[in-house]
Image (cartoon, rainbow, N blue to C red):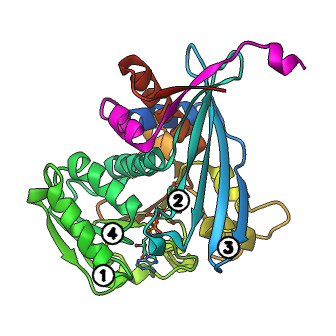
Amino acid sequence: MDFERYPDSSFRYLTRADVIEAARGVDIVAAVADALRLHSTGRTVLPEEAYLGWTTPEGDSARLLAMPGALIPDGRPVVGMKTINASLGNPGRGIPRSQGFTLLLDPETARPVVLMEAAYISAMRTAAVTALAVRHLAVDAPRSLGVIGCGPLAQAHMALLVTTVPTLRRVTVYDLERSRAEALGAFIATLPGGEKIETVVADGAREAVRDAELVVPVTTVTEGYIEPDWLRPGALVCHVSLDDLTEAAVLAASTVVVDDWSLVRDDPRRLLGRMHRAGTLLGPDGTPRDGVTAQPGARRVDATLGELLTGDHPGRRDENEVIISNPFGMSVLDVAVADRIHTRAAATGIGTLLTL
Ligand SMILES: NC(=O)c1ccc[n+]([C@@H]2O[C@H](COP(=O)([O-])OP(=O)(O)OC[C@H]3O[C@@H](n4cnc5c(N)ncnc54)[C@H](O)[C@@H]3O)[C@@H](O)[C@H]2O)c1
């Protein structure tokens, strides 16, 4: 068959350790900011993600996400896909809840050029989105942060925020498993700049949120529990795990920002998508979902993160407004960061060349 006639092609394989090593030479916040700007100016391709959920033989919830995306900057397009897959029982087995691959293709031949471990990039690009939201939406010189859920995403956030928010002095952490909150505190102390930070382990989620100018929920809940009166005036909630706020908290916020409205709109599972289906959340153009009637008291999505970066939205308007950033998670950010990591890995010989 023709398959045997064609010349072999090779691709680079990067393990998690390779990815982490190559990422040391990459400014992940800058890569994410550039990708958000491209997205905001229509120079990305972001298809709806494919979601496959199942119950594992041991009864846990598991899911596969397939997230293709492309960036069309001046010059060479960047085309790829992340597949990130998770089982809620994994942390109890001592393995990460989620792992997977990010793949980049040659934009000319569409052949794979690099395959790399996905979870590190996914966590760091998500933390970079939070760092950018803090830059544009937080009160001036924020000093206090509340983190709910103390897994890998919480660690990734701390690794970035300790340097990108140099005014940070107090971090209050809470996890259903107290040992994970304590471990996050110990991790913060090891970070460069971590010595300036007092870490407090809270006894409940409300205590973690109460005094915090920055609130980052990184749990695995599917039902909201952060009520509007839990939040102090001026709080910025970076709603990373997407289901921690109650509907009332979203309705009470002064400003709601998303990364991409179409992803939020098309997803039936997470809070904002559910609110849009119920007629309590309107799109950025102020209209309800087709076939849905807007409910009294419904609110609009105010802006995208890209609009903050391009200056099309002013960001925070006063020191007392409560702001929500709801980053659904865009494949184009993984693809953008993976591209920079691949460039660095290829230049420095990191990784292994494999035959397709
Ligand atoms: N929006 C995005 O772009 C994006 C990207 C990556 C991950 N995420 C989300 O971030 C979340 C965290 O990811 P992870 O890999 O760290 O997960 P993980 O399961 O490894 O850790 C989550 C932690 O939260 C704790 N937790 C669960 N429910 C809690 C509750 N009600 N109160 C306090 N603590 C609670 C768990 O004990 C665990 O320690 C996941 O929901 C994931 O889907 C979002």
Q: Label 3, on which residue?
A: 56
Q: Quadrant of the C terminus?
A: top right
Q: Label 2, on which residue?
A: 98
In which quadrant of the rendered view does residue 174 lie? Answer: bottom left
Q: Quadrant of the N terminus?
A: top right
Question: From the viewer's perspective, is 206 left or right of 337?
Answer: left
Using the image, tell me which numbered label, if any, was put on residue 178. 1
Of label 3 and label 1, which has the lower sequence position?
3
Question: From the viewer's perspective, is 4 left or right of 181?
Answer: right
Of label 3 and label 2, which has the lower sequence position?
3
Whole-percent x, y for residue 338 in the image: 49, 34
Foreground: disc 4 or disc 2: 2
Element under disc 2: strand
- Magenta stretch encompasses residue 36: no
Residue located 54% across and 74% down the image: 89
In the rendered image, the vertical position of residue 213 relative to residue 137, given as above or below: below
